[in-house]
Image (tube, rainbow, N blue to C red):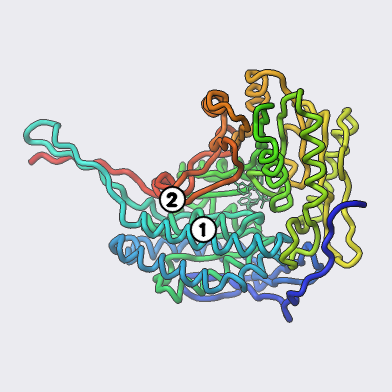
Amino acid sequence: NDLTIITTASIALPASPFEGRHFIDGTWCDSANGETFERISPSHGVVVSRSAKGGREDAERAIAAARKAFDVGIWSRISGKERATVLLKVADLIEANVERMAILETLESGKPITQARGEVSGAADLWRYAASLARTLHGDSHNSLGEQMLGVVLKEPIGVVSIITPWNFPFWILSQKLPFALAAGCTCVIKPSEMTPSTTVMLADLLVEAGLPAGTVNIVLGFGQPVGQVMAEHAQVDMVTFTGSTAVGKAIMAAASGTLKKVALELGGKNPQVIFPDADLDSAADAVTFGVYFNAGECCNSGSRIIVHEDIAEAFVSRVVALSKKVAFGDPLNPDTQVGAIISSAHQEKIDGYVRAAVAAGAKVQLGGATLPIAELPGRFYQPTVVTGVTSDMPIAREEVFGPVLSVLTFRTLDEAIDLVNDAPYGLSAGVWSENVHTCLEFSRRVQAGTVWTNTWMDGFPELTFGGFKQSGQGREIGPYGLDEFLEVKTVVMRI
Ligand code: NAD
């Protein structure tokens, strides 16, 4: 075929698997039951890591350590300046370890090494930004309540936070949560995805080196059942922050409801980009191509459906198809690779199922639409895929495909485009491409999405906040709102 495929890389595979253990109360430990599990690289087929497989007892020990650390209060009571000093040291240490962490992240997740490097070094900036927020924990005071009254609203750390993360951006997503929880003065228990546990484990060494007190951050490795479940339902946990699928988000909310603990959820997306005829179509086509193939489409912000004006649809799709053929798929350890492996066989099947169902319902595959066997690599790859003739009732247009698959819908009027955007259960992000500022503004105001990109896609900054409408979640991450999530508000009323 005429796709761009990369079959080799000069970075050598590690000589032996990374060994991951739980990190509880400042100590490395095995599971109480002695069990372990292995992660096999989705691109290279080798065992990348062997990790302790946590059980209920390990999760409960970690929660007890975080509870004790919070209640003793070394971390929760020191000044914001002291917390910031530690967080800044962690940021420096992350930067010094980018390559080691990026190689493991690439081999566990299948993502290209350049994107893994960018993810880890970008995460260091989240730690720096969170450090700056550690010095901004202030509430309000009210001196207009009558002569003898003073009201003070304090912001306090919420307490023990469970952090449960997915496999698609393991270190980035952890860094959208952990440094903000720490800046607020919370203590934490973390469970990384069983697919990508190792960069979280590596972080623990850096936290120790930076001087974080024992018990402040605890890590339990393992699966949603039982570890994640215990972390969501346990009475000694004050909040659970979760990023992952909408289905598991609902299960976590149900598990947390027994104690009515706070829940913050960053869930799935079905993110549209709407292209008007007056847009800069070269930039739009570049952004659409990037938006759908970034991280092999295994991205909550994947621009997986485009809604393009019918006058330009055919020409625009031809342009995207031509660009898609130039995107380099293949060995994720090669720095020239732009799209790596699919996370699991089951997931690859799921991606393929969406495409087959769309075709059966009348859609047309313009490019790809099948797995991409690469003789030199034992892993799983999927072809860049563009599907036209998609209608909004098809599962490929409504559900997360989470693969390198673009669905194309068409529209005639702004109202129709907005209806199509909002006709999905998700509301994470949306994009509009037009040179008309009124079109962009009206679109931004009327669409149900936590982030709206106008004439750009996927730009993000630690200063700005991120989160979803509808079934894409609740609560917000990063930016000052990201800090607020981890703070409880207390009103003190004084007669003076
Ligand atoms: P997932 O929901 O399968 O798993 C996420 C985490 O939850 C893992 O650590 C898993 O072990 C754990 N888990 C599973 N069952 C659990 C349970 N019953 N109780 C507690 N924990 C449990 O998600 P995934 O496949 O790892 O990640 C992909 C999903 O994440 C996609 O839907 C994607 O859109 C979403 N995501 C969202 C964002 C965002 O910011 N909105 C970012 C990245 C990924």
Residue beneath disc 1: 175
- Horizontal arrangement in the rendering, residue 59 relative to residue 15 (left or right): left
In which quadrant of the rendered image does the C terminus lie?
top left
In-front residue for pair 142/457: 457
Q: What residue is drawn where x is 84% and y is 50%?
A: 383
In-front residue for pair 198/358: 358
Q: Is residue 293 visible?
A: yes
Q: What residue is drawn where x is 41% and y is 66%?
A: 88
Q: What residue is drawn where x is 28% and y is 62%?
A: 79
Dot 1: what SS? helix
The image position of residue 35, as x and y in percent, is 68, 70
Dot 2: what SS? loop
Residue 422, picture quadrant:
top right
Indicate the amino acid at tag 2: Asp
In-front residue for pair 317/237: 317
Q: Is disc 1 surrounded by few (<14), some (14 to 19) or many (20+) residues within 10 Å?
A: many
Residue farthest to the bottom, as pictured: 15
Q: Is disc 2 surrounded by few (<14), some (14 to 19) or many (20+) residues within 10 Å?
A: many
Is 105 placed above or below 473 here? below
Indicate the amino acid at tag 1: Ser
Q: Is residue 492 visible?
A: no
- Horizontal arrangement in the rendering, residue 260 relative to residue 389 (left or right): left
Residue 380, picture quadrant:
bottom right
Residue 187, picture quadrant:
bottom left
Is 491 placed above or below 375 here? above
Residue beneath disc 2: 238
